[in-house]
């Protein structure tokens, strides 16, 4: 018994402490009714110690992505840099990040779940910020920066100082897609690979393998939530707002759980190698079909329009 107690006491507290789950905002900004002015451009929500969720308002850009700022003792990590605002809108993202970091002397790393245009719009502004590194978005840039040696099977670490974030390759929606795991909160920041909305798949085999790997990781670690980059589903099961909707007053909650990842993996496994649309209560999987030559984007069905 004495040996067991000594062994237990020798384990660092951080290694045995249960994660502290993040808390959602009671209400996310979700656009404004037609004819009303867009006053609140973004929303900042402190979801837990050292974790801030920033959402762009749908009246700024209908993609309305969620960005995540995670603070450590030496570094800060910003996941994604947002979508381009409508013309004439002065969007204060860099100023907001500066305010949240405050007077702490933290270097800033701007990384991305993936390189689609609604996730990289303010990269240029952060490149001009002092003490800041902006990770490239090509597969080679991602592999090089995070020093992946077994892509897409491996994983990497980002040490923020007192907070180590695990970086997981997750190609399928996009070739260099990543997920980020924060063990302090048990949160997987899953980008466009899992969220309550349209999960567009460009590479079906890669996506199926990525989701299977993510499930294996999640079942081996204390995961409390999956925090994605968008909300497109309604609070009513199986109902989704059309893409480009500018006002979503009855949104689904942002966080999904391990049960949703299992549903997704089970559905992909059952579907097999042939891509097909999959509908569940809290998400829809849609294989991406490139438009044929001469097809105008505005004439495409709404479910085909997400990049």
Image (cartoon, rainbow, N blue to C red):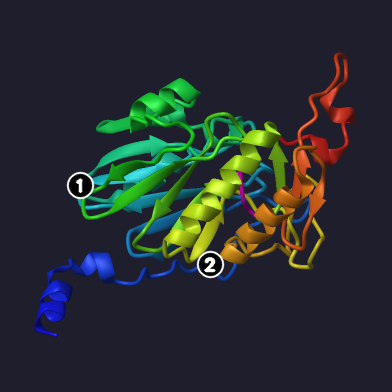
Q: Which residues are magenta?
A: 191-195
Where residue 243 appears, x then y in whole percent?
Answer: 77, 44
Residue 244 in view here: no
First along the sequence among labels 1 and 2 = 2
Q: Examine the rendered structure and indicate whether residue 176 appears above or below residue 257.
A: above
- Which residue is depicted at the point 53% across and 47% down? 213
- Residue drawn at (75%, 47%) of the image: 285
- Specify whether 265 is left or right of 14: right
Give the quadrant of residue 235: bottom right
Work out whether residue 230 can be spotted.
yes
- Residue 25 is tagged as 2
Q: Secondary structure at mark 2?
A: loop
**Above or below for 11 versus 227:** below
Residue 44: numbered disc: none
* Quarter of the C terminus within the rendering: top right
Kindly report which numbered mark, 1 or 2, lies closer to the viewer in this rendering: 1
Crowding at mark 2 (Cα within 10 Å: few <14, some 14-19, many 20+): some
Residue extending farthest to the bottom is 1
Q: Which image quadrant is residue 88 in?
A: top right
Residue 261 in the image, given as x and y percentages of width and height: 61, 58
From the viewer's side, name the closer residue of 35 and 20. 20
The answer to whether residue 192 is magenta is yes
| Residue with the mark numbered 1 | 74
């Amino acid at each position: 018994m004495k040996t067991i107690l000594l062994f237990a006491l020798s384990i660092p507290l951080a290694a045995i402490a249960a994660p502290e789950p993040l808390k959602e905002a009671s209400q996310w900004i979700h656009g404004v009714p037609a004819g009303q002015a867009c006053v609140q451009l973004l929303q900042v929500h402190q979801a837990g110690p050292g974790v801030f969720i920033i959402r762009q308002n749908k009246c700024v850009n209908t993609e309305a992505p969620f960005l995540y700022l995670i603070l450590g003792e030496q570094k800060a990590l910003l996941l994604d840099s947002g979508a381009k605002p409508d013309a004439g809108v002065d969007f204060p993202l860099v100023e907001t990040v500066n305010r949240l970091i405050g007077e702490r002397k933290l270097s800033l790393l701007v990384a991305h779940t993936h390189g689609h245009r609604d996730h990289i719009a303010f990269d240029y502004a952060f490149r001009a910020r002092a003490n800041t590194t902006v990770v490239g978005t090509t597969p080679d840039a991602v592999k090089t920066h995070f020093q992946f040696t077994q892509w897409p099977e491996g994983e990497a670490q980002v040490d923020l100082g007192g907070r180590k974030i695990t970086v997981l390759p997750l190609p399928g929606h996009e070739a260099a897609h990543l997920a980020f795991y924060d063990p302090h909160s048990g949160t997987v920041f899953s980008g466009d690979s899992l969220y309550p909305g349209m999960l567009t798949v460009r590479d079906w085999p890669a996506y199926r393998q990525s989701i299977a790997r993510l499930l294996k990781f999640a079942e081996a670690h204390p995961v409390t939530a999956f925090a994605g980059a968008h909300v497109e589903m309604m609070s009513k099961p199986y109902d989704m707002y059309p893409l480009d909707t500018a006002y979503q007053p009855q949104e689904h909650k942002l966080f999904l759980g391990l049960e949703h990842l299992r549903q997704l993996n089970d559905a992909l496994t059952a579907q097999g190698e042939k891509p097909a649309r999959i509908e569940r209560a809290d998400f829809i999987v849609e294989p991406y079909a490139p438009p044929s030559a001469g097809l105008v984007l505005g004439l495409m069905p709404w479910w085909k329009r997400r990049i």
